[in-house]
Image: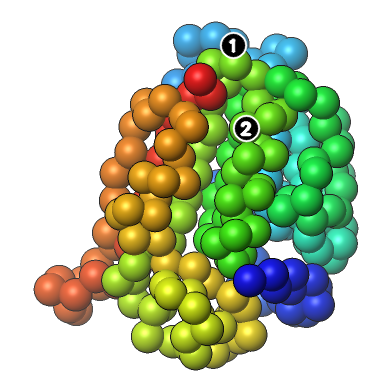
Amino acid sequence: MSMIQKNEWEQFFAANVSTEWYPSEHCVRMLCSYRKEFGSAGKKILDLGCGNGRHVWLAAKEGFDAYGIDLSQNAIDLARDWMSRDNLAYKDLRSGNIAQALPYEDNFFDIIISYGALDHMALDESKKAISEARRVLKPRGLIFLKLEAKGSFTSSYGREIAKNELILDKPAEKGILQHFFDKDEVADFVKDFIPVKSFRDDARRFDDMETNYQSRWIFIGKKQ
C-alpha cells in the first residue's frame, strides 16, 4: 500500500507544536562512542527523515559532515533556521521522499540515523527506504533505527488500515500513518545488516508501572 503523506507532515511542522528540540539519548550515546573511536572530521552522517533537524544539529555540533532529508519542506525550513541560529554548518538539508531513490551516491555515508521516520510509512514504502539507505551507506558503515513497537500505547489511538498499521487520531499526530513493528517484522527489516546492538526500549509511566507507556525498537547495525 502506498500512502505518501506530504500534506499531513507539512501541516504538522507548520504548527510547530509537537516538534522535538533535543536529540535522542540513544543517538547521543551512539554518536559520541563513534566519535571517540573513529573521530568525526570528514565523517558523513545522514539523518533520514530528519524532521526539524535535531540529529542534524547533534551531528554538526560533534564535528561531523551533517546531511538531512525529509518529506516536509516546512521541516527543512525549521532545521535550516535552527542551524543558522546556533551558527552550525551543515553539508546539505533538503526535502525529498525517502521511499524513492535518494539523491546521494552509492557508499557515501559513514552513518545513517533514522529516528521515528520509517515507522511513519506503510511497510512496503519503508522497505524501499531501508534498501536505499543501505545503498548509500558505506561498507561497514553504521545505521541507527528507532521503530515504534507493537503494543506501544499509541496503538490504541487510531483507525487500523492494515496489519500493525493505523491512521492516528491523537491530537499531536492526527491523520498521520503509524506502523507498529512486531519482532518478526523488525528481524526481516534489518536482515541485510550485521547487528551491533538491538533492544526494545519500554518507557513506563510513574503512576502506572504495570503498563507500557511507549515501546520502541532500537537497532544499530553495520552494512555487510
The spot of residue 40 in percent (x, y) is: 64, 16
Distance of mark 1 from mark 2, alpha carbons?
22 Å
Residue drawn at 80 percent across, 44 percent down:
101
Residue drawn at 24 percent across, 70 percent down:
212
Q: Nearer the viewer, residue 107 or 117?
A: 107
Residue drawn at 63 percent across, 71 percent down:
1
State the scheme by which the image is colored.
rainbow
Determine crowd level at label 2: few under 14, some 14-19, many 20+ residues with C-alpha closer than 10 A.
many
Q: What SS does tag 2 mark?
A: helix
Is residue 71 among what the camera can see? yes
Q: Is residue 173 above or below residue 73?
A: below
Q: Is residue 32 above or below residue 157?
A: above
Which mark is in front, 1 or 2?
2
Residue drawn at 37 percent across, 26 percent down:
196
The spot of residue 37 in percent (x, y) is: 48, 10
Q: Residue furthest left?
A: 210
> Of label 1 and label 2, which has the lower sequence position?
1
Q: Amino acid at mark 2?
A: Arg
Asked if residue 116 lies left or right of residue 205, the reply is right
Query: Residue 39 has which mark?
Result: 1
Is residue 25 among what the camera can see? no
The spot of residue 96 in percent (x, y) is: 84, 53
Residue at mark 2: 134
Asked if residue 11 lies left or right of residue 32, the reply is right
Asked if residue 219 lies left or right of residue 114, the reply is left
Q: Amino acid at mark 1?
A: Gly
